Image (tube, rainbow, N blue to C red):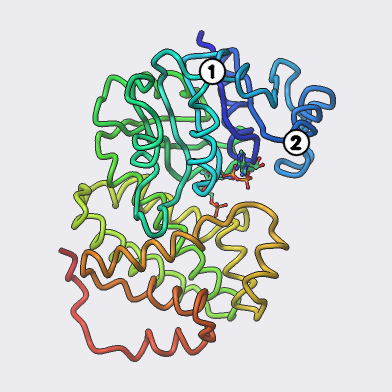
Amino acid sequence: MENVTVLGAGSWGTALALVLAGNNHDTLVWTHRGEQADEINIHHTNQKYLPNIQLPEKLVATSNLEEAIHHSDIMVVAVPTKAIREVCGSMEQFLKDKKLFVHVSKGIEPDSLMRISEILSESLSPDIVEEIVVLSGPSHAEEVVLHHPTTITAACSNLDAAEKVQDLFMNNYFRVYTNDDVVGVELGGALKNVIALAAGISDGLDYGDNAKAALITRGLAEITRLGVKMGGNPFTFAGLTGMGDLIATCTSVHSRNWKAGNMLGKGLKLDEVLSQIGMVVEGVRTTKAAHQLSERYDVPMPITTALFEILFNEKEPKVAVDELMIRMKKREIDLY
Ligand SMILES: NC(=O)C1=CN([C@@H]2O[C@H](COP(=O)(O)OP(=O)(O)OC[C@H]3O[C@@H](n4cnc5c(N)ncnc54)[C@H](O)[C@@H]3O)[C@@H](O)[C@H]2O)C=CC1
Ligand SMILES: O=C(CO)COP(=O)(O)O
C-alpha cells in the first residue's frame, strides 16, 4: 500500500481520494480552504461538491501544503486547469525529492495553448518530477462515489509509470487501462468539454436526439482532425478518453459543461450560468484555446467556432445552429 496525496478537494479530487482510500492507500487530501479541511475531518462530508455522501473516517484532509507534500511521493493533481500554475508555484518551495505526478484535469490553457502535462513540465523543476501520468476517461465523480462501474485510462509515454497508476487506482468498480498517447488522451479529455457545452445548448433549445447525435459525431470528427494534426493517435480518439468521455459528458445531467450549455440554450447569460453552477466549467476557457488551436493548426472546427461566437461574441445560440446547418456542402469522411 502507498501513501498518496490528492491536491484539490472538489468533486473529482474527493471522489478519487475515496477510490484510493478504499484501495487501502494512506490518502491525504489537500484543500486551500481550511474550513473545507475541517468539514472533511470533523463531519466526514464535502457537501458543496458531493452532497449527501458520507466519507470514511480514514480519509484525512489538510490545508497545510507542506504537510500534504511530505505525506507521499505520489501527487494526484485535481484542481481546475486555471489553478495548476498557482498550485505548482506554491508547491515548489516544499518539493525536495522526485515525485510521481498524476494529473486529472481536463483543459487546455488559452494563449499558451499548453496541455496540462506541458504546464506541469514547465512549472516544476525536472529534479523533482519522476514522471507525469494523465488519468482521464468517462468518469463522473457522482457515479464513482456510488461505486458504479467506471473505466478510465492512465497515459504516459513511460508505460511502467502508467501501469503504476493503473495498479494504484484499479478495483472492482474502477477499471483502469493504459495508453502511451499522452497528446491524444489530454486533447480528447479537454476538447470533449467544448462539445458537451454545445450539446447542452442543443438540449436547452429543445432540439432532439438527432441534433445531439450529430454534435457528438461531428464533434468527434473535429476533435480527431485537430488531435491527429497535433500528433495524437487516431485510435485514441475512438477510445475511452475520446468517444467514451464525449458520450458521458454530452448525455449526462451530472456534467457541469452540459448543464452550462443547457442554461445558455435556455437564454441565460454566461456570467449567470457560471455563478449558478458554482463549480468549474472547463469547457468555457477550453473553447477559447480550441478556437486558437484551430487557427494555429489551420484545422476547420465549425462546432468549436460556433461555440466561441456564442460564448465570447454574444451570438444567439439559435442563429449559430442555423449557420452551422447551412454551411457549404461537405463530404462526411474528411478526417485527416
Ligand atoms: N467532477 C468530475 O466528475 C470530473 C472532473 N474532472 C476534472 O478534474 C478537474 C477538477 O474538477 P472538479 O474537482 O470537478 O472541480 P470542482 O469545481 O468540483 O472543484 C475544484 C476544486 O479546486 C479548488 N481550487 C480552485 N482554485 C484553486 C486554487 N487556485 N488553488 C487550490 N485549489 C483551488 C476548489 O476550491 C475546489 O475544491 C477539472 O479539470 C475537471 O475537468 C475530470 C474527471 C471527472
Ligand atoms: O469529465 C467529466 C466526466 O468524465 C466531468 O465533466 P464535467 O466537468 O462537465 O462535469
Q: Which residue is mark 2?
A: 46
Q: In the displayed image of the protein, which residue is found farthest to the front?
A: 93
Provide residue 4's location: percent of width, then percent of height. Answer: 54, 18
Q: Which residue is mark 1?
A: 4
Provide residue 330's location: percent of width, then percent of height. Answer: 21, 82
The kind of secondary structure element at disc 1 is strand
Report which quarter residue 50 is drawn in.
Answer: top right
Kind of residue at badge 2 = Asn
Classify residue 221 as left or right of residue 304. left
Classify residue 186 as left or right of residue 23. left
Provide residue 242's location: percent of width, then percent of height. Answer: 35, 51
Q: Residues within 10 Å of mark 1 (few under 14, many from 20)?
A: many
Ligand 1 contact, mark 2 (Cβ < 8 Å): no
Classify residue 53 as left or right of residue 186. right
Report which quarter residue 255 is drawn in.
Answer: bottom right
What residue lies at 65% left-to-right and 81% top-to-bottom? 267
What residue lies at 63% left-to-right and 16% top-to-bottom? 67
The kind of secondary structure element at disc 2 is loop
Q: Residues within 10 Å of mark 2 (few under 14, many from 20)?
A: many
What's the mark number on residue 131? Answer: none
**CA gap, disc 1 to disc 2?**
19 Å
Q: Earlier in the sequence, mark 1 or mark 2?
A: 1
Q: Nearer the viewer, residue 94 or 245?
A: 94
What residue lies at 50% left-to-right and 41% top-to-bottom? 84
Residue 246 sits above or below residue 334 on the image: above
Kind of residue at badge 1 = Val
Quadrant where the C terminus sits is bottom left
Tell whether label 2 touches label 1 (CB within 8 Å): no
